[in-house]
Amino acid sequence: MIETIDVLIIGAGGGGYPAGFRLARAGKNVVMIDPKGVMSGNCLAEGCVPSKAVREAAELYLEAGRMGSFGLTGSVEVNYRDVVAYKNHVQIDRYAQHGEELAKHDERLRLIKGHARFADAHTLIVTSDGGERIFEAPHIIVASGSEIVIPPIPGAEFALTSRDLFAVNPTLQTIPKRLAVIGGGYIGLEAAAFFRAFGSAVTILENGSSVLSAMDPGLVSTLLRLLDPAIQPITHAHVDAIE
């Protein structure tokens, strides 16, 4: 059985769900298909929203330490499980907010957890836990976003990814004593910065000549001056294996 819809959207992230809301308000019947089954995609599920919640906790911890240096408070310790619980709360609260927004549109806007593939220019086959469904629409928006890419390093299965740090109830629940970050992009630097704030000894291994290589060099030089001096990125570092 083929279900006919006004607009199909592949992906419910920062590109997909605002389009879905606006189209639904305009009277269109819209179906969004997303493998995570949440609006805001990676940003909410395991990206910018939870990482900023952890970063905020790290900033508060550093600020409390600075106040202590002036004798304004006693010693402060961080309980990373509480930080993770706070991060989870922020994510789940946002899920609820999006769910309420979704409900406002009744049947005009639906979110299906699943994977979509094209059968032709106007037909999608959606595979979900409930099996396969077929949707047809005159308009299909592709807003599939990004996904974690693990470099082909032998032993990469022993390493953590941002999903292990930021998903709800993530794999990592304690502060590591020592942490090596492979890659000096903004995600790697952000994780390095807040784990250093929490007390980890951090090393950044960057294959290129500079961290944040895709950004303006003037901006990078300014940002690096703000990085904790205990974090020393090692450039031209090629990781051969993880054991």
Image: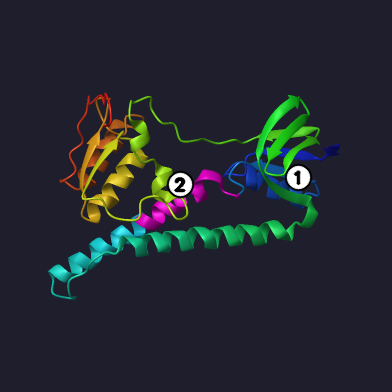
Answer above or below: position of 226 versus 76: above
User: Contact (CB < 8 A) between labels 2 and 1?
Assistant: no
Residue under numbered circle 2: 47
**Does dot 1 land on a helix, a strand or a loop?**
strand
Residue beneath label 1, please?
A: 30
Q: Which part of the image, by quadrant, shows the N terminus?
A: top right
Percent across and percent down for residue 145 are 55, 36
Secondary structure, magenta segment, majority class: helix
What span is in magenta?
Answer: 38-54
Image coords of residue 231 (percent x, y)? 19, 43
- Going from the N terminus, do you reach mark 2 or mark 1 first? 1
Image vertical order of residue 219 relative to residue 90, above or below: above
- Mark 1 nearby-residue class (10 Å; few <14, some 14–19, many ≥20): many
In the rendered image, residue 50 lying in the magenta stretch gets the answer yes
**Colouring mode (rainbow / by chain / secondary structure / one colour):** rainbow
Q: Amino acid at mark 1?
A: Val
Is-magenta flag for residue 166?
Answer: no
Residue 121: image quadrant is: top right
Foreground of the two, 126 or 146: 126
* Amino acid type, residue under disc 2 in the picture: Gly
Q: State the mark number for residue 183.
A: none
User: CA separation, marks 2 and 1?
Assistant: 26 Å
Q: Name the quadrant containing residue 124.
A: top right
To which quarter of the image does residue 153 belong? top left
**108 sits left or right of 209 in the view:** right
The one nearer the camera, 222 or 137, is: 137
Label 2 SS = loop
Give the residue drawn at x 39%, y 50%: 171
- For the C terminus, give its image quadrant: top left
In the displayed structure, does residue 230 sit left or right of residue 198?
left
Q: Position of residue 239 (x, y in %)?
A: 26, 26
